[in-house]
Amino acid sequence: MNVLLIVIYVICGIYMVLNFKYDIQMFQQNSYRIPRYWKWLKRNLGSSWRLVDIACLFMLFSTLIPNVAATFIIAGVAIVKSILIFRKKYKKPLVFTRRVWRLYIVTALLSIAAFVLMATLPGIGNVQYPQFVIALGVLLLLTICSFIPLILADIILMPVEAAINRRYINDAKRILRSMPDLNIVGITGSFGKTSTKHYLQRILSEKFDVLITPGSFNTPMGVVRTIREYLKPYNEIFICEMGAKQKGDIKEICDIVHPNCGIITAVGPMHLESFKSIENVQSTKFELADAIPAGGFIVINNDFEYCANRYVHNVTPIRYGITNPEGCDYIATDIHYSPLGTRFTVKGKDGLNLNLETSLLGEANISDLLAAVVMAWQLGVEPDQISYAVKSIHQVEHRLSMKQTPGSVTIIDDAFNSNPVGSKMAVDVLAHFNDGKRIIVTPGMIELGAQQDELNEKLGKYIGEKLDVAIIVGEYNREALDRGIRSTDFNTENLHLVSSFNEAQQVLAKILAKGDTVLYENDLPDTFK
């Protein structure tokens, strides 16, 4: 029995350690912040995965099954679940950074130490529950409550991580000090900042050597990593995307890079779960404007109320807009959409009158493009260079990007994110397609705090008024979207409620026909159902 017992211990121990991977993955997706992770955890404590382990724990201490039989069953469950861990695919898998490895190792060591203590300490157990049962129970308990050793490991490592971060930040600051002629452009906003970043890079590249923060490297340490790993002495402009989920996040990045100009693309109801109010969103986004030194300037989207009503006193505000031209220094006008793209004119109070063509669709894209044009113009890019660059810009992947399938079905991919303005615009774009059925596949919008239900119901109503087929994915916003759609004259036979994107694909396979257009609007991360 001793050899078999050791094998069972090893199997269950391996499963316990592998099981930490998912918790650390969710911790990473919650920005390594315990309060955010705890909010996610409270929604997911009753997951079926965890319930299986709880059932195994009860079985181990049950008098209905002999202890030895129970241990073999538990080992079998551990083997099956370990295999499933390796096979499971995620939309955003765990990135094994050095920090993750440190967290993983300390979490595993704490748990293994607790198990070894219970397995070897004299006097543990009795006739009914021998020591090996107690030890195996501890293994199961640690697996069920895997968040406890994880949080404890993070607390233990906090001084270490702080010291490492300080060293990296100081190194990034040193690199920036060595490049005094580098223009640093900050870009932030509730939405539109990533698209604006890419559009601006393309336009500025006609005249300058430009570096941008890659992917979603819009956190302080993401920006630091960009500087340390990608910034070269010959770069002339550094475009720094700045993300935020709570007050002070933008200021923290500005204190590292010290931008001399910037763009605020929008202030809207995003991340209200952490910001609590739109006023907090506004003050956080405008931390960029507050950080610009004298002699610099900030480009602001006046189409949003909480951008237009925010006074900027420390530097020159340059305001742009489409729907709210009053008070703007630059506007986009004479906008004409076609299947091939968009034509529009940029007019400025300084006399700028620039006719532009782009393959981009949708008012929000034109707004983001307008911000990039204004910034490029302020930095000295010539009108003909702007015109050429704008014409060659392609849509950023997963942001209203379009493609045709061999079966003559049009796919509109807007899956990267979703917000009230962007989702409405995406529906408007889809509504312009009249050759076949207009189909939306969406799980709705997230991180909208107390307005989550209301805004998703409004989206549902808009879908019901504009489109032909709706496929609602998952449970998170199902009731609100369903309620909104059913409040219209929408044919409910064309309303499909499915549990996953795989099920959505099965529905599409049955209903798609030549000439149809499918919009994929938002794709919830793994932290949401």
Image: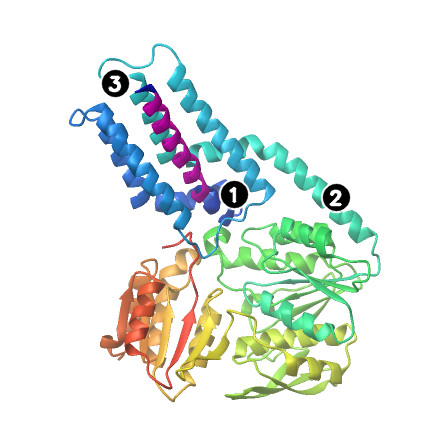
In which quadrant of the rendered view does residue 480 lie? bottom left
Left/right placement of residue 94 relative to residue 475 reads: right
Q: Secondary structure at mark 1?
A: loop
Which residue is tagged 2?
170
| Amino acid beneath label 3 | Tyr
Left/right placement of residue 360 relative to residue 57 reads: right
Q: What is the residue that sits farthest to the top in this orientation?
A: 123
Query: How many C-alpha atoms fall within 10 Å of the one at disc 3: few (<14), some, or many (≥20)?
Result: some
Residue ID at (62%, 32%): 159
Residue 392 lies in the magenta stretch = no
Which residue is tagged 1?
33
x then y, percent, for residue 88: 39, 51
x then y, percent, for residue 142: 38, 31
| Amino acid beneath label 1 | Arg
Give 495 or 316, whichever is nearer the viewer: 495
The mark that comes first in sequence, 1 or 2, is 1
Residue 12 lies in the magenta stretch = yes
Which portion, as a residue range, is magenta?
Answer: 3-22
x then y, percent, for residue 392: 65, 81
The mark that comes first in sequence, 3 or 2, is 3
Which residue is tagged 3?
129
x then y, percent, for residue 411: 43, 77
Distance, label 1 to label 2, CA atoms, is 22 Å
Q: Secondary structure at mark 3?
A: loop
326 is higher (above) or lower (below) than 250: below
